[in-house]
Image (tube, coloured by chain):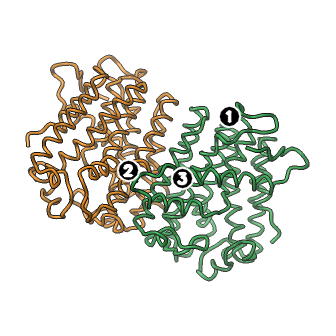
Chain colours: A green, B orange
Amino acid sequence: MSCVYDFNSKNFNIETYLQTRRQQVEEALSSALQPVYPGAERLFAAMDYSLLAGGKRLRPLLFLAALEGFNKGFADNSTADEPDLSAFLPFACGIEMLQTYSLIHDDLPAMDDDDLRRGRPSCHKAFDEATAILAGDGLLTHCFAMLLSVPADSHALVKAVRYFAEKTGIYGMVAGQCLDIQAEGQPITVEELRQIHQAKTAALLQASVVCGGLLGGADDDEAAALAEFGRQFGLAFQIVDDILDEVGDAAVLGKPVGSDAANNKTTYVSLLSLDGAKQAAAEATQAAVAALAPLGDKGRLLTALADYYLNRNF
Amino acid sequence: MSCVYDFNSKNFNIETYLQTRRQQVEEALSSALQPVYPGAERLFAAMDYSLLAGGKRLRPLLFLAALEGFNKGFADNSTADEPDLSAFLPFACGIEMLQTYSLIHDDLPAMDDDDLRRGRPSCHKAFDEATAILAGDGLLTHCFAMLLSVPADSHALVKAVRYFAEKTGIYGMVAGQCLDIQAEGQPITVEELRQIHQAKTAALLQASVVCGGLLGGADDDEAAALAEFGRQFGLAFQIVDDILDEVGDAAVLGKPVGSDAANNKTTYVSLLSLDGAKQAAAEATQAAVAALAPLGDKGRLLTALADYYLNRNF
């Protein structure tokens, strides 16, 4: 992998860094589901259709940034200038498979019943419902094979992947989707909205960051700091998302704005007003960055990501 | 855990052994999904509804029998008479969660559309479709948290769980369900039927046995022998299942017979005739037992299980 940064230098450019890493993730994803199981071509086509549909790849990028911050675990192939992260890209791909499965299943008719995803037919519309259910199941299961394939210390790997399964399962994402469905059409408080997003969205962001740290050699205190960063990042990220839906530029966002209001969706903006939401986003962003303080230099790359994704002039 | 056997002794009784282990698995399963995530009570109720619906618990029993055969990895708490397997029961529970998720999703309207499972409403009928999809996703994800929670050697655990994810995912079970759906209503050959069952049914049996061996300290050759045993066991098991559907005693089986023929389902009996199926089952059973030969005493318990489940006078 090419040298893209010395993130301590004055020449470090976060956009260049993110673009390079995103390309590396895209490339790894494009060949992640080889070989195709004979006879199951339709299943593999459906998985690739959803997995390779673009997107920010935010969760893999957070994982890699946390891992690079600790800059351990991949020392064998690295030079001073060029840490070799390529051996850890399968873990990043596994994280994106998990995210993709959750979108496929959330879009199903029995769930949110969304016909479109990123401007094109959702998986069950492009294929069929059975194939979409299986594509989700396949991506979810294969995620764990990917996570467990990287050459990390076995003890750290077991700890990281177990944490990942808890945060993405019944004590995180899956529970969050259950809460979200139940809340549909009901009046909810800010605290209830926060709880839903904590489980549904922030838990995976948290898991991605914590796993990067653990595979990089983070101790328990450092992992706890990363978890708090992920929690606050997730909160801020969701609030910013709600704000952008209200005031963003459709051309920049690549999706229509105002859809939340049109769908009567409860958001931070609808509950807190636009100014209140902006303040809440700023507070959560500050809390995220503050959580990294104990990590010193190990947290600098994540701080740059938080600044890039969360600090906006609306 | 109580002492139930010295399976080398003349007093060893396979039925007593299996009953004791099954009870231990049932007990562990009944508290496996605690604590309930606040607000997600319906999700947890649906998971428990399907997970605690009885069944043979064949896959956890195969895992435990393979582990006990190697009789390693749990030596710390064992006495000569009484190996302490309790620390490994979470792995057995994880295997059953995987099996249960696959049944819940297979029963969905978009898949096999089965309203009944084990004589009572299937999960999406007892609850609703969204809850059933989420219950399956939750069991599948939490399976991996359970598998990774046991106090095995970390290196062996990573290897075992990665193998498990491959065999239950897109290179095994999920692919098998895809093949099965595609074959519905189509004429297929014996070889095609065998391929479907290899992926859909045998792969998880294989993974259960191989994981037990790996956690018990099996080397690569021993793991390969266990994999071949699992493959042949899975084949024989499916053929026996087809035969029993034709000639079995509904009272003993606890389910109606003749349903395959009534549903025009392609089975080993419909393709090979009853006598041909009996011969194929006997051959696969012999091949399963033969595969264990290199393991010596380590394979005796699995041999007893194969004999119990597969050698029948029809």
The location of residue B54, given as percent across then percent down, is: 26, 49
1 or 3: tag closer to the N-terminus: 1
**Mark 3 belongs to which amino acid?**
Thr
Q: Nearer the viewer, residue B109 or A191?
A: B109
Q: Residue at x 64, y 63 (%)?
A: A54
**Badge 3 sits on which subunit?**
A
For label 2, the SS is helix
Q: Reply above or below: A124 against B310.
A: below
| Amino acid type at image mark 1 | Gly
Asked whether the residues under marks 1 and 3 belong to the same chain, the reply is yes
Instruction: Name the spot of residue B229 as percent of width and height, x first.
Output: 29, 34
Cα distance, mark 1 to mark 3? 24 Å
Left or right? Give the position of A230 relative to A101. Answer: right
Task: Please name whichever residue, A4 or B207, is drawn nearer the observer in this view of the structure.
Answer: A4
Q: Of residues B302 and B85, which is closer to you in this image? A: B302
Distance from label 3 to label 2 (Cα)?
21 Å
Q: Amino acid at mark 2?
A: Met
Drawn side of residue A149 relative to residue B241, left or right: right
**Number of disc labels:** 3
Q: Position of residue A314 (x, y in %)?
A: 80, 72
Residue labelled with disc 3: A168
Q: Please say if A253 is above or below A295.
A: below
Residue receiving disc 2: B173
Q: Are marks 3 and 2 on the same chain?
A: no
Residue displayed at 57% across by 71% down: A117
Q: Dot 3 lies on which element?
A: helix
A267 left or right of B253 in image: right
Residue drawn at x 45%, y 42% is B146
Per the rendering, the mark at residue A73 is 1
